[in-house]
Amino acid sequence: MKYEDPACAYCPPEVRACRNGEAEARGPGFCPSRVDPATQEDAHAIYGEPETRKIARESAVVESAGYCKWTRVEEIIEFSKRMGFKKIGIANCISFVDHAYVLSGILESHGFEVVSVACKNGNIPKEEVGVADSEKIRPGNFEALCNPVAQAELLHAHGCEFNVVMGLCIGHDSLFFKHARGLTTVLVAKDRVLGHNPVAALNLADSYYSRLWGPLKPAKPPKLPVAGRRDG
């Protein structure tokens, strides 16, 4: 079979040859090393750029140093220190203001300057982008549009070198990433139903959250193989 697109999601746990430097020799037919080695080579060359090389190196060192020891917050702190960042921006959902307050204090205790901007800044009415009253969460009331574009612009305008996203809605986070001009990481991925732990839906896709499957669900849907549950 000739594959046209990479499909790493289907790589069996016992293969995953790229972990051992054997992708070209043992990778399945859908492995990126077999499907599109030219794009891989172009991407590989970018690591020769000084900034990209530094980011990649410090990321790898933080991964190793804190492996299964440091929380995500600690990793953010260590990465920021290794990168030499002085000013960190927080782009948070307004529902996470209290968490942003704690994070801001923690970052400041390590000597960082912190700028924080909540999603509802600017109090733009949702009607301005075409949202009908019947499409609001609470029809009949004023509802402010989430404003990730301004979050990105404000953090950039105020000199942030690194941005931390906390709980932005789906799509709003995408707009933030699109307009952010500094490096960005995610501390909290919003999932109102699962306590902001979206991976739980995948862990339980064959049981409690079987409703996730669409009409083209395969007869034997994929499950998480126990042997495959490993971090990077």
Image (spheres, rainbow, N blue to C red):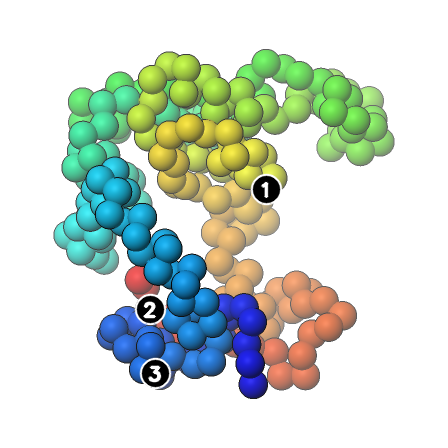
Q: Earlier in the sequence, mark 3 or mark 2?
A: 3
- Could you tell me which residue is drawn at 49 percent across and 68 percent down? 6
| Quadrant (top left, top right, bottom left, bottom right) of the N terminus | bottom right
- Provide the residue designation for mark 3: 26
Structural crowding at the residue carrying mark 2, measured as other residues with C-alpha within 10 Å and reported as few (<14), some (14–19) or many (≥20): few
| Position of 217 relative to 148 (above/below) | below
**Total count of labels:** 3
- Provide the residue designation for mark 1: 170
Find the distance from the CA under tag 2 to the CA under tag 1. Answer: 26 Å
Q: Position of residue 27 (x, y in %)?
A: 38, 79
| Position of 53 relative to 118 (above/below) | below
CB-based contact (under 8 Å), mark 1 and mark 3: no
* Front disc: 1 or 3: 3
Front residue of this view, candidates 175 and 105? 175
- Could you tell me which residue is drawn at 62 percent across and 83 percent down? 220
Find the distance from the CA under tag 3 to the CA under tag 2. Answer: 20 Å
Picture quadrant where residue 81 is located: top left
CB-based contact (under 8 Å), mark 2 and mark 1: no
Q: Position of residue 118 (x, y in %)?
A: 50, 23
Q: Is residue 183 visible?
A: yes
Q: Is residue 123 left or right of residue 71?
A: right
| Position of 162 relative to 114 (above/below) | below
Q: Is residue 226 visible?
A: no
Structural crowding at the residue carrying mark 1, measured as other residues with C-alpha within 10 Å and reported as few (<14), some (14–19) or many (≥20): few
Q: Position of residue 203 (x, y in %)?
A: 50, 67
The image's mark for residue 230 is 2
